[in-house]
Amino acid sequence: MKTLFKKKRITGIFEIGKVHSKFAILEEDLKGNKTIQSVKEAGPEALRQEASLDDLIIILSRNQVTVRNLELPTTDPQEIKDIISIQAGKQTPFSRDEIIADFKTIGLTRQHYTKVLLAIVQKAVVHNFLNSLAEKKEAVSKIVLGSQVFVNWYSIIAPKIGDETFAVLDIDNDFSDFCVLSKGGLLFTKLLHFGRRDLSKRAWQKSFLEEIGLSLDAYRKESIGPLFNKVAIMGMNPEEIKNILAKELSLETLGPFEDAEGISISGEAKAASFPKLIGLALDPARPLMDFLPQGLKQARAKRIKRKELMLTGILILSVLIMGLGIFLEKICTKTLLLRRLDAQFVKLEDGTSELKKEYLKINLIKNRMDTKNSALEVLREIHKVVPQEIYLTNISFEEGKLISLRGTSKAMSEVFKFVKTLEGLPIFKNVKTKYVTKRRLKGKDLTDFEITCPLIRE
């Protein structure tokens, strides 16, 4: 759980040498700042002692890898893979099942032809080293060729020479690596059987020139890439080697390269000479040829997927818990507020009980005093306008709604005049006759009627 929320990402970089191996610790913070904290010569036991590594990158030295420059009669990526799968088994004395191979296209030559750099390593070499790591084997993210790591130095060297093709000479203790780089890519690499220990021998200059000469001849003979006249010297940087290259081969030398932009190197690392370790630390995520067995790649991908799912689950759960906490906090706040308001309301209610009683009395008096549309008021208004020719026999009153008048008139015309008169009163609307019928009584004509008068509501 602690590794999910670490402030720094720790990457171990281990270079396997023939006699001496080298180890570095790279720390990268959340802002992308990189620091090489430790660089030293050490064996696999140094890795096993490291408490926590997020990634472990293995660098294979040049003497452990067979490298070939090939020209393939196709430009189709799938066809190139198929041809490489066949050619890889033919370039070494081992069967195809005993090797791990990877390649990188380095350019096009003639029409429909592709130049390829093929690298091959024995499975036994890889598995023996991985087994020596014990549980730290799970941290291995990739296994790369040391020669190709120098492409990470390109951004530092290029400003000094522009876009020119140049060589890199890495002088190690037991052997040296001669590489040619162009436009940020590795074109050629050759193992030189010459190292720092040979500088103490007599006539070392002759063997050194022979090794360099063979490399230059191989590069030129195979027409691998553009010619060059500059060499960046990595590792140890004696003046005598610079002089030999300049005088005998007309090669201009570059270096040493002490400062690397974008990375901080501790004093211990600066005091040593570990160009491959530092080079890889410049850009550990750069895609390089990879010799990690397929089974370990798949197992690592599954572990990373599980870790990402776990992290996603934790983040979702955290968000849900935070949301629930905020929701409960709001409920508690509103509950407390309601309780305070209820308490204040009770206090106010106690103080206003007398006012409520007085208010009810006032309303009661007001209602009694308000005689508009009351039965008495309506009868009073009707009494004012009833003509002598009309006799009311029945009055029905629905409070607030209407009044119904039944009666008798000597003439029907008097009934309709009465209706018009009622319509003129401000308390009625839509006055209508419900019925008007004639009858005779003792030889006289009478008209019975019923009039409905809806009240106007205020």
Image (spheres, grey):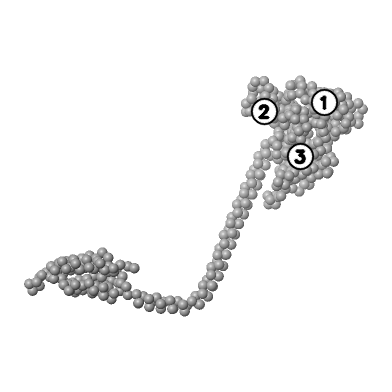
Q: Nearer the viewer, residue 66 or 389?
A: 389
| Quadrant of the snapshot with the C terminus | bottom left
The residue under label 3 is 261
| Mark 2 closeness class: few <14, some 14–19, many ≥20 residues within 10 Å | some
**Amino acid bearing label 2:** Ser
Q: Secondary structure at mark 1?
A: loop
Q: Which mark is residue 85?
A: 2
- Figure quadrant of residue 200: top right
29 left or right of 328?
right
State how far apart marks 1 and 3 are (Cα).
26 Å
Disc 3, disc 2: CB below 8 Å? no
**Amino acid bearing label 1:** Leu
Q: Which mark is residue 251?
A: 1
Which residue appears at 72% of the width and 30% of the height?
183
Residue 243: % across, % down: 87, 28
| Mark 3 closeness class: few <14, some 14–19, many ≥20 residues within 10 Å | few
Which residue appears at 24% of the width and 68% of the height?
422
Q: Secondary structure at mark 3?
A: loop
